Image (cartoon, rainbow, N blue to C red):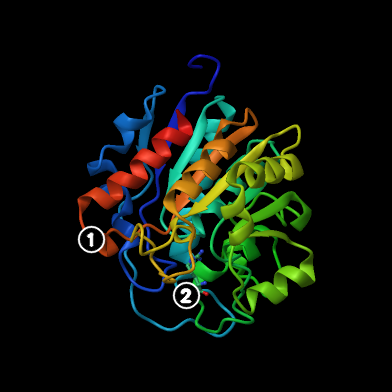
Amino acid sequence: MDGGRPLLDLLAAPSSAAAHWPGQERAWAALEAAGLPGALGRGVRVRELFAPARWTAGRAPAGRVRDAARVAAGLAAVRDAAGAALREGRLPVVVGGECTTTVGLVAGARAAGLRPGLVYVDGGVDLRTPADNPTGVGDSMALAHVLALPGCEEDLLAVGPVRPLLEAAEVRAVGVRPVEPDATTAARIGLVCTPADRVAADPEGAAAAAVAAVSGGDGHLVHLDVDVVEFLDLPLADVPDHGQGLALDVVARLLRRLCADPGLRGLCVTEVNPDHAAGPGDVGQLVRVLADALA
Ligand SMILES: NC(=[NH2+])NCCC[C@H](N)C(=O)O
């Protein structure tokens, strides 16, 4: 403990195996070079969970996630490290890697005997499955696998000690822009979403409402996809959506409130593609936002 707050385990999961193309496997190296470990302080302990797992070409077998075994192996490493951190009373801060990295964090919490809620801060809701996305790109499917929706990939579901890892009522999606067909699925399964414009109007209020909705006795986890930030302000997202994102300052305020809450049990930072950065200062801006949120 450090002034009553848990010490940090910074867990690097450098992967683009589940992505649309290579790049995210270098997110950890870029964040480390930009000074993330030192900026976090709080007795940070760094663990690199596996060697960079770079995207390879190849089509998905019908009904499957591309490269499922390799993606699942990475998620299992995240599960084990995050679970160990939580059992020691430390706070896991996972650096992906793709959105699917969060499946490993939630699985780790459940393996540690906890059932925290999940605040999913992301431009999309990642509710696709191989049944409705025949490309098999796992990066559009993270929340679907947390919720174990029909049509999910067995290798990824098997990472969890239980299935589903969480029910839709235990998740709030925050910062969402309308993306079909995910929006249809969200409405069908009753996933409550806070749209991006509502976050822009009141980031602290949106954060407080999400925490109040999902954070119970075992607190809450936070997923951050950098694509929630407007790409034209901070070009880091692996799959950019120009003109649709939130101002960096809004995301910083949202994240600060989500992480300041004593119920925080873990954070997963995803979808950083350093190849998209215009210069080294861009990754540095993200380091400052993360350090400020976890200070
Ligand atoms: N949150 C993410 N998964 N970001 C990557 C964007 C994925 C994109 N929505 C797709 O359908 O493939």
- Count neighbours of disc 2 (C-alpha within 10 A) and say few if under 14, some if 14 to 19, many if 20 or more: many
Q: Is residue 43 above or below residue 223?
A: above
Q: Is residue 165 left or right of residue 51?
A: right
Q: Tell me the residue that label 2 is attached to.
A: 66
How many marks on residues? 2
Q: Is residue 18 above or below residue 134?
A: above
Residue 229, compared with residue 259, is above or below; it is below
**Percent position (x, y) of residue 23?**
30, 64
Q: Is residue 53 visible?
A: no
Who's the residue at 69% across and 63% down the image?
Answer: 148
> Disc 1 marks which residue?
278
Q: Determine crowd level at label 1: few under 14, some 14-19, many 20+ residues with C-alpha closer than 10 A.
A: few
Residue at the front extreme of this rendering: 201
Residue at 38 percent across and 63 percent down: it is 231
Q: Viewer-nearest of labels 1 and 2?
A: 1
Q: Check the picture and name the quadrant holding the C terminus.
A: top left
Q: Would residue 182 be found to the left or right of residue 213 on screen?
A: left
Residue in view at x 21 percent, y 51 percent: 280
Task: Name the foreground residue: 11 vs 292.
Answer: 292
Q: What whole-number distance in Å separates the C-alpha atoms at marks 1 and 2?
A: 30 Å
Where's residue 39, x and y in %?
33, 31
Going by the numbered disc 2, the residue's amino acid type is: Arg
Residues under numbered marks 1 and 2 in contact, where contact means CB atoms less than 8 Å apart: no
Q: Describe the element under mark 2 as helix, strand or loop.
A: loop
Secondary structure of the residue carrying tag 1 is loop
The image quarter in which residue 11 lies: top left
Kind of residue at badge 1: Ala
Relative image position of residue 249 (x, y in whole percent): 45, 47
Q: Residue at x 38, y 30 (%)?
A: 40
Distance from mark 2 CB to nearest ligand 1 atom below 8 Å: no
Of mark 1 and mark 2, the one earlier in the sequence is 2
